[in-house]
Image: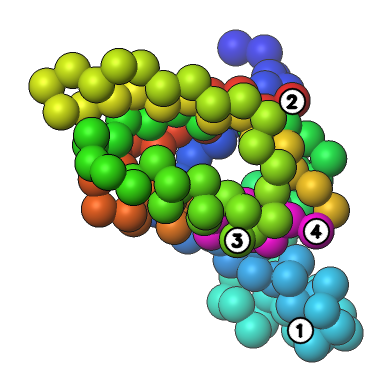
Amino acid sequence: MGESTGYFVVKQRAVPEVLLKVVEAKRLLESEKVRTIQEAVDAVGISRSSFYKYKEDIFEFHDNSQGRTITLTFQMDDETGLLSEVLKTIADFRANILTIHQSIPINGMASLSLSIQILETTGDVSQMIADMENKKGVHHVKIVAKE
């Protein structure tokens, strides 16, 4: 099987611990809390070879999303004010809503699709999505496109 250059968006809980530690080591280096790669890998508990093997292949979603558009889909309960709460979350993170499409609720559940422009001033996109997903009545938030 040939080497692929495709990308995947996965939730943090699905990422192997070694990759999360590589991200943390990169954070330590970027924040200048440590001066060397050896100090960074010692701090997070991985080998230098693991760091070098994965450092170009793992990055936080927020780091590469600025200036892009993401499209999310999810289902939500047909409850007064719930859509407003979701949209307020996006506003609180200073992202720009480009499109909203909501289906007519069937059996108390509506499907929603949002296109969101990620700006330079937008907060942590991963946290924004988590906050939306954690709202009572919001189900199955998924990123379906990133442009």
Task: Name the quarter where the N terminus is drawn.
Answer: top right
* Picture layout, residue 32 above or below residue 77: below
Residue that carries the numbered disc 1 in the rendered image: 39
Between the C-alphas of marks 3 and 2, the distance is 22 Å
Residue at screen point 36% across, 17% down: 103
| Mark 3, secondary structure of its residue | helix
Check if mark 3's residue and mark 4's residue have beta carbons within 8 Å: no
Work out whether 33 lies above or below 64. below
Q: Are there few (<14), some (14-19), or many (20+) residues within 10 Å of tag 2?
A: few
Tell which tag, 4 or 2, sits nearer the viewer. Answer: 4
Where residue 54 sits in the image (x, y, percent)?
69, 49
Residue 21 visible to an observer of this rendering = yes
Q: Residues within 10 Å of mark 3 (few under 14, many from 20)?
A: few
Mark 3–mark 4 distance (CA, rounded to whole Å): 11 Å
Q: Label 1 is placed on what type of residue?
A: Glu
Mark identifier at residue 121? 4
Q: Which residue bears the numbered disc 3?
A: 92
Q: Is residue 64 above or below residue 13?
A: above
Q: Which residues are magenta?
A: 121-128
